[in-house]
Amino acid sequence: MEARRASRTVSDPKVRHVGFFTPDPNPQPGWNPLASDPPVSNSLSPVIIPPPRQPADRTAAVPVPETGVRRQTGADQVPVGSYNPSESLLGSSPVPSSPSSRVGLAGGEFSEESNGWFRRSDSGKFASSLPDTMVERAPENSASAAPVLESKKSVEATGKGGKAVVEEQNEVQSSSKPLKAKTTKAERRALQEAQRAAKASGKEGNKSAAVSQGAAPVKPVKQPSQKKDGPPVSVSVSVSVVSFDKKGGDRPPEKERKKDVPAPRMQFDDKSRVQKAKKHAVVKQTEARNRVELFRHLPQYEHGTQLPDLESKFFQLDPVHPAIYKVGLQYLAGDISGGNARCIAMLQAFKEAIEDYSTPQEKTLARDLTAKISSYVSFFIECRPLSIGMGNAIRFLKTRISDLPLTLSESEAKAALCSDIEHFINEKIILADKVIVRHAVTKIRDGDVLLAYGSSCVVEMILLYAHEMGKQFRVVVVDSRPKLEGQALLRRLVAKGLSCTYSHINALSYIMHEVTKVFLGAASVLSNGTVYSRVGTASVAMVANAFHVPVLICCEAYKFHERVQLDSICFNELGDPDAIAKVSGRTDVNYLNNWANKENLQLLNLMYDATPSDYISMIVTDYGMIPPTSVPVIVREYRRDHVFI
Amino acid sequence: MDFQVVVLAGGTAKNLIPLVSKEVPKALLPVANRPVLSYVLEHLEQSNLKDLIVVVEGQEAAALVGNWISGAYVDRLHVEVAAVPEDVGTAGSLRAIAHHLTAKDIMVVSGDLVSDVPPGAVAAAHRRHDAVVTAMLSSAPVSGPSESGSSTGKDKTKKPGRYNIIGLDPTRQFLLYIATGAEVEKDIRIQKSILRAVGQMEIRADLMDAHLYAFKRSVLQEVLDQKDTFHSLKQDVLPYLVRSQLKSEVLLNGAPQTEENGNQKVNSQSNQVTLSGILANASTPSFHQLSELGTNGSTRRTHKCCVYIADNSKYCMRLNSIQAFSDINRDVIGEASRLSGYSFSPQNNIIHPSAELGLKTTVGPHCMLGEGSQMGDKCSVKRSVIGRHCRIGSNVKVANSVIMNHVTIGDGCSIQGSVICSNVQLQERVNLKDCQVGAGFVVTAGSDCKGEALAKKEK
């Protein structure tokens, strides 16, 4: 563990960007293929998984004229700023004295790779790696990606052209350059026409031969460019590129959105949508006025008005089952908090609701019950945003409902679902916790000083179990305002006879030097290894890392999610801002009374933060102890397992 | 939502004589020309509670109330009127109808409550904490607003506006102590055990038990069965439950209910223990759970007594005294006019179109003039309710008063702060101040009364 930590630099931007959707890492080789040495390209290779390589000779065989044309297309559409580097690149291309053919080949290779990557990104990326939050923005993203693609292409093409100049130095080169200069006008006109045609083809079904090629997948597009040469063909190629970009930008995400991706998360800075959502909301919520600019997209309501409103509607809410209502009320009032407890409470409420459920006439259980559950879920969301673990549990339940055999009678189906829910609670939460405890306890040695932050039920179980086993260790409980959950943990630990130290997070760096291990809970673990947890966890992990103290995250696998998140901004939860304005037990500290009336003051009470995987030594989960890089494996391999217990 | 509602409409309350009589039980006393019971029923109806049990003391009163309900709410509410013998008290009434109660929780509402506090809020608080009883508290009414100080000044000095003494925990969600009735005047005796468990208690005298309770049915029935001597919910059952909340006896016999308190499962399955452990740790433990665990390891059974404190902006008042009767009448047409269900004229008063006003007669704001009433010339009416078919002569001054139906008032009368029941005849130049005149009474010409209760000697 020590060695690994030493080898790793914490703030390595390249590592941090691993796996995240952004065009930034990719253009690097495209922009300066010469500067990019083989090692760099190797380090990036996990990011850009190259498609099965086309034979290298293909790039070499690409006739130069075509590249010139391509460059024209790029110049046509890309602003001048992005054109310039390619020029400079051209100028610098003869510099390498190493076998220039190799360099040219490398450039070609990169262009191929990036093209492939981008193509895949258009179709596959949005389905898999793009987080749900982004779906709404997907069209814009793809649209913004498209010009990048083009500009890059142009650059690559020119780069290639330049290298071709270097390596071959024959009459092809001489023909290519004048061609570039001469054909400009004619080419442009042809190109414009072709573009128009492509646009039209995008809308209508009728296509000319060239356009139909453009609409076809990528490979057929490439082949004609290989076979033929000369201006007309190159025009068709350019058309194909353009039209492809259009398609890539617009169509696939749209289709995907309809089919696979769950409904996009509400962006609460979008007024019209918020209005629409309000119409069928159960809980009447007035939005808080002084919201922090950066977090406008998150729901924030005036706390204190929701509860009385929901309470007063107690008898009006016919469709909501009493058990559901009770749990929702407890979420809203903050009586239940903590990922596991909320999930268990929700599942138990679902169980009760299913037990009392009877299928109405002329409806099938699977469909009607799913709709019912969905309405309950939206009620819960109104009470408090769901945690990721809860989302997984809901997904599990819904699949179980939809997978029910039609032959089952209603009572049998209900019994099956109830036992499924029981199974989930027992196996995914309680047994998982026990397994985690068994695993984690092996890491506690006599004389250890363990640090726990906030109040995580798994961490508490670990500490208590280790204490029961007779291990000699000390616990430092670090806490933070405004919830001070650590005090509850502290009380229970002290009651069991553990020797504890209690401190607040601002004293963290002072206490950290005596700590030997840090145990943290998590609300969710995301597939890039980011740990999403109670706010403050990231700073604890960071400080621990700075002190070379191993950080162990304890999280049940049902809280894992395939989403990728780099910051705690795009997806978070806002708590009651009043909570941080008040100091409990000190009524005389009232400087922030009536803060809501002050226009120029906004309070931010974030609930969660994202801890980058660099700070995490190990994740203890019910499938064993894994490094944060292995989270995607768990997510991938056991996803089926989530669904089919 | 698995709630059953019981409206305790009472019978002929003694403290409202001479306003109530055999013909007009307490539930049918008019408030702004509507029986007081209608306020409760319509309030419940708004909350979508349409299956009600109305308990009335006394057969005749029950018949009267039943007739009225079936006439007024025949197609809107499903009301069952149950008659219980007189003087059984509220606890006795519930005992008598116990076999009707089946739902998980029972909501008990007093029939004389005039309020716009949503009953759902009480029910929700009850469910949220899984409480045994939840009581609604409202801020105690200040008797008589300042503008009518002259008329009610005396009552103010008599009544210190203290109805209950209530002890709350720091979060103001749990009821730790309650003194009602005669106990209010005595010394406060608080159990050490509760105080020790909670650590801090807030004692309030400005809150009033509004007599709207949510009970867990099993517990309520058990208490009523075991304690035969309990007469009143407010004075016996509620204080008993509050007193015994940390050494609960009620749940010992109610086997099925122990299941509902998640932390009371002593299940052999370790999974269940872990499960309840997670759930218990998730919330900040209430003092109940802490004292349950105790220091000596022995688990004690507890139950929770919750309160719902009505917002100050809501109106909440019980018609349980003559003073309250005039206050409610004044408020319903005045500041709490949203309760009355009438639409007010631009002059802020309600004058029925069929009412006839004489020359130079003024009806001020916050007044109500019922159907078919006639007023002579040069009268003035201020902040008063006048019922149906009253005949009022000339030069009559009415202020801060309630005049019920079919009252005849002669010329030159002056009525201040008084309640005049139906069929009363006031002859000329009668001067009444702070008086109550019972039904059918005849006040002779020229009498001058102050602070008297005038009623026919019955029997």
Image (cartoon, coloured by chain):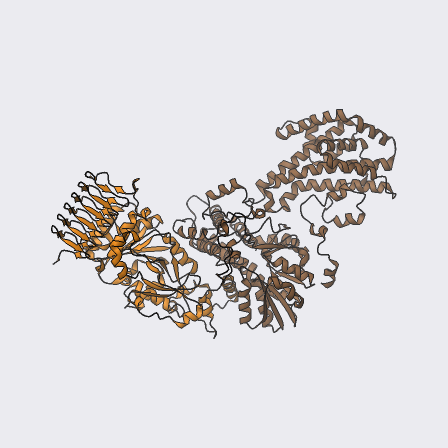
Chain colours: A brown, B orange
Indicate the quadrant where residue B166 lies.
bottom left
Q: Residue furthest bottom?
A: B296
- The residue sitting at 70% across, 28% down in the picture is A210
Q: Is residue B96 left or right of residue A346?
A: left
For this rendering, which residue is in front, B86 or A293? A293
Q: Percent x, y for residue B112?
A: 28, 55
For this rendering, which residue is in front, A283 or A349? A283
Vertical arrangement, residue A203 with respect to residue A379, above or below: above
For this rendering, which residue is in front, B429 or B53? B429
Q: Percent x, y for residue A37?
A: 81, 47
Residue A59 in sight in this render = no
Vertical arrangement, residue A579 with respect to residue A290, above or below: below
Q: Is residue A249 left or right of residue B185?
A: right
Could you tell me which quadrant the C terminus of chain B lies in?
bottom left
Q: Percent x, y for residue A56?
A: 80, 40
Residue A88 in sight in this render = yes
Vertical arrangement, residue A96 with respect to residue A315, above or below: above
Looking at the rendered structure, the number of numbered marks drawn on it comes to 0
Q: Percent x, y for residue A404?
A: 51, 50
Q: Residue furthest front?
A: B150
Vertical arrangement, residue A441 with respect to residue B149, above or below: below
- The residue sitting at 63% across, 43% down in the picture is A126
